[in-house]
Image: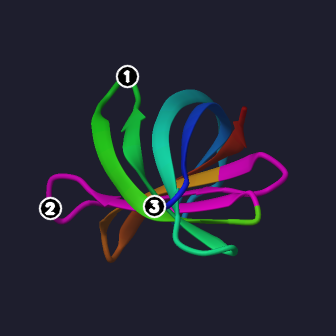
């Protein structure tokens, strides 16, 4: 039986960067509720939900050495990519098309 670990993170993003434009200050918040299931001594599969004021998304990805890399798909053709680094810094990017994306930068606790 694989080991499971429940993770709950509160994330605050302070920079919003639209592709092709100058980054702006923001106060965007997201909550992550995940379950990690160890696959071996190095890597875990992470499944869960990201909740913001605008939407709730199902995310799936991998966890390794304290870093989370998650992906999800909203209403097509939107694609979501969420990374929490081992130092708690985080990036969240929404790709709306091949020519438009928004990246948020901040941290999670």
Residue 80 in sight: no
Ranked by sequence position, the earlier of labels 2 and 1 is: 1
Q: Kindly report the distance in space between the C-alpha atoms of the residues bearing marks 3 and 1.
A: 36 Å
Labelled disc at residue 106: none
Q: Kindly report the distance in space between the C-alpha atoms of the residues bearing marks 2 and 3.
A: 36 Å
Nearer the observer, 44 or 88: 44
**Residue at the spot of label 2:** 76
Q: Which residue is depicted at the point 30% across and 43% down? A: 57
Labelled disc at residue 1: 3
- Examine the rendered structure and indicate whether residue 78 appears above or below residue 52: below
Q: Secondary structure at mark 3?
A: loop
Q: Count residues near mark 3 (Cα–Cα under 10 Å), then give few for <14, some for 14-19, many for 20+.
A: few
Q: Kindly report the distance in space between the C-alpha atoms of the residues bearing marks 2 and 1.
A: 20 Å
In this picture, which residue range is highlighted in magenta?
66-90
Labelled disc at residue 53: 1
Residue 11 rendering spot, x and y as whole percentages: 62, 33
């Amino acid at each position: 039986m694989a080991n499971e670990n429940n993770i709950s993170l509160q994330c605050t993003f302070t920079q919003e960067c639209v592709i092709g434009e100058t980054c702006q200050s923001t106060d965007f918040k997201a909550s992550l509720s995940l379950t990690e299931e160890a696959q071996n001594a190095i890597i875990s599969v992470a499944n869960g939900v990201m909740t913001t004021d605008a939407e709730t998304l199902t995310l799936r990805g991998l966890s390794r050495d304290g870093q989370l890399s998650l992906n999800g798909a909203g209403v097509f053709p939107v694609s979501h990519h969420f990374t929490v680094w081992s130092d708690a810094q985080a990036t969240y990017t929404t790709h709306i098309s091949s020519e438009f994306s928004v990246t948020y930068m901040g941290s999670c606790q």
